[in-house]
Image: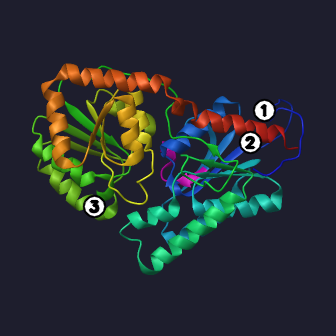
Amino acid sequence: MRKLRQATGDPSSEGQARGPDVSIVTSGHDIADARLHRHVAALAAAGLEVEVFALGDSADAPGGSTRTVVSPRPPLWKRLALAQRYARDAQGRVLISLDPESAHACSQVARKSSRIFVADVHEDYQAVLHDRPWSRGLVKLGGTVLARMGAKAARTADLTVVADSHLMRDVEERVVVRNVPDGVGATPRDDEPRAVYVGDLRRTRGLFDMLEVLELCPDWKLDLIGPIAPHDVEEAHTRAAALDGRVRIHGRMRPDDSWKLADGAWVGFCMLHDTPAFREAAPSKVYEYMAHAIPVLATDLPVQARLVEESGGGRVVSGVAEAVQALEAWRADPDGHAEAAHRAAAWASGAEQYLQGSRTLAIVIRELLQATP
């Protein structure tokens, strides 16, 4: 973290003409993104005025934002230009970037205007390129260049925020702000067994594994909540349609609506494949499932498996066959399932990870504003 000049005063003091305190800038994320919503809620609760520049539909804007600017999703080669326009138009004293090209653009603007630049890094962006089927040839080269530009900007930011401890390890003063909900809120489970998945959907995130599990578990239903990767859309809808309405594909939803729909589910899927992008990741959906007392069914990747085993709030499986066995065992033993749900919620009520959410970001942002004239 860059050493800032010391000053006194409250950034939300009355009687001072000011624009927004914080601008959140992303040329790669939809305005319905859950992390973005959590950040805005925490910053607004701390008395800060927040504007958002993102993609998608302004109807999905987070509550608490005072201004939102949205654009359609651009092709990769146009994202840097959009990020630069967003960063120039941002009025906040603090610029928070959520992706590599926005980090680069915000860094440049902050340097020229003496504003505070915060880089929020929630993925290993170079590793993510190995998980995208479109990432080949010149497109992969361009993505690699953007990822490196973003990482360089994040290393020189006034504050580097990471979503998990395995990210940006070479930045000594980074702050961990995890993708965790603010509280625990269990609801009664449905009468009939239902599974749920919340998040981006593609093959490597277990999309077709989940559909295969449902094909083999005729007494279960499944809600898929989130956008499907374009190259997987046709197969996903075809296979879901063959399951007599037991699989519902909802598409992207606002985070609050997603979890209202998820409430009552018996199982939350997290069947990530073993890719460089996922191997050391702590998926936010695992924390969310457990906070909603939804037992987790997760593949045997180190971090998510450790979370499930430590909490006792779910099962770790090696693939489709073991997932089918787990679902059928819970269906046959509702009391055993209820115990897993209880353990999930109990763990979420006391685990230290839940103290490292977006409220941590709000505290640090206020400190930075108070230390800067």
Provide the secondary structure element on which disc 2 rests: loop
- The residue stretch that appears in magenta: 53-62
* Distance from the alpha carbon under mark 2 to that under mark 3: 40 Å
* Distance from the alpha carbon under mark 1 to that under mark 2: 8 Å
- x, y percentage for residue 283? 43, 44
Q: Mark 1 is on which residue type?
A: Ser
Of mark 2 and mark 3, the one earlier in the sequence is: 2
Is residue 167 placed above or below 336 in the rendered structure?
below
User: Contact (CB < 8 A) between labels 1 and 2?
Assistant: yes
The label shown at residue 12 is 1
The label shown at residue 232 is 3
- Is 214 left or right of 259, judged from the image as shown? left
Q: In the figure, residue 236 lies in which quadrant?
A: bottom left
Q: Mark 2 is on which residue type?
A: Asp
Mark 2 residue crowding within 10 angstroms, few (<14) / some (14–19) / many (20+): many
287 and 358: which is toward the camera: 287
Q: In the figure, residue 253 lies in which quadrant?
A: top left
Provide the secondary structure element on which disc 1 rests: loop
- Residue carrying label 2: 21
- x, y percentage for residue 237? 21, 54
